[in-house]
Amino acid sequence: MEVIIRPTADAAAELVARIIAKELRANPSLVLGLATGRTMESLYAKLVRLHHEEKLDFSLCRTFNLDEYVGLSGSDPHSYRHYMNRHLFAQVNIDLRSTYLPNGMAADLDAECARYEELIARSGGIDLQLLGIGRAGHLGFNEPLSALRSRTRVKALSPLTRAQNAPLFDSPDQVPHRAITMGVGTILDGRRCLLLATGDEKADIIAKAVEGPITAMISATTLQLHPRCTVVVDEAAASKLQGADYYRWIFANEPEWEPFR
Ligand code: GLP
């Protein structure tokens, strides 16, 4: 794992956008794993800008989102399909037929989860998995006690997660109780993982995810098992990291990061 600390949330999102752009330019058929949440909004705005200003080309790439609420259709403004169309897909030259999210309205949810895993496998697996982190440390909706080897399945959302996502709904009781999410094992199968977290409210959980013991209580701790994981944070989210000086030294000295400094 590498941890990169940028001065501001904007600079952190900019770096993540540059990493994604570099991967996409190197492999235009990239299979990209995508995430939702407020943190990602500025990142997607930057990818849209790179598309317009630097001709970043999404026409051949395929995307798989981490999760979707159960019971919301893609036309519901609170669905993650709606979020993705609005913040990214409708603003770049991606083929919508190559953008996948689990179908939270499927009559048979277990079959839908199996179908989603199958689609990822048939696409050759995820090359680059973008991740946010919930305040309780979930990746996607892998809530506390998610098995380290779990695959795409339906999860009940914890009260903390529902409260955290409530401001995005008209009222707290509108937040769905369940979601389909890629499993921890599905996420760890991605060839590269890239986590973006910003703001003070993520400082405690980032310290646990990066420096704490691996536990099913905090699915983000499992990223410590991943052979190629980059965590990008701003100063606020980095404020509880004990090894911050060392992480800064790595970023300043590793040749890989030269073009991004
Ligand atoms: C939701 C998503 C997560 C995301 C989290 C963080 O719970 N399922 O994938 O990481 O929100 O959201 P925010 O960026 O709004 O803090």
Image: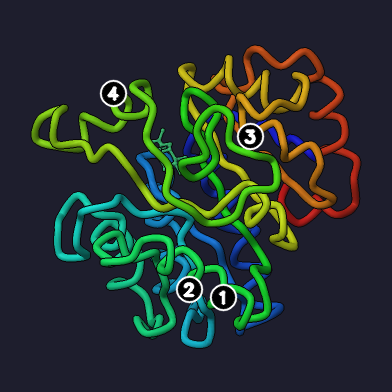
Q: Nearer the viewer, residue 233 or 56?
A: 233
Circle 3 — which element? Answer: helix
Q: Which residue is mark 1?
A: 118
Q: Where residue 230 appears, x then y in whole percent?
A: 72, 45
Q: Indicate the quadrant where residue 216 lies.
A: top right
Q: Is mark 1 within 8 Å of ligand 1?
A: no
Find out whether the residues at labels 3 and 2 contact each other: C-beta distance under 8 Å.
Answer: no
Q: Quick check: 185 above or below 217?
A: below
Give amino acid for label 1.
Glu
Residue picked out by circle 3:
220
> Circle 1: is it few (<14), some (14-19), or many (20+) Cα within 10 Å?
few
Closer to the camera in the image, 106 or 101: 106
Amino acid identity at mark 4: Ala
Quadrant of the image for the N terminus? top right
Position of 170 relative to 124 (above/below):
above
**What amino acid does circle 2 point to?**
Arg
The residues bearing labels 3 and 2 have C-alpha atoms spaced at a distance of 25 Å
Query: Which residue is drawn at the image coordinates 23% and 40% (left, top)?
Result: 176
| Residue that numbered label 2 is attached to | 115
Q: CA distance from mark 3 to mark 4?
A: 19 Å
Q: Amino acid at mark 3?
A: Ala
Mark 2: few, some, or many residues within 10 Å (few <14, many ≥20)? some
Dot 4 falls on a residue whose secondary structure is: helix
**Residue that badge 4 annotates:** 163
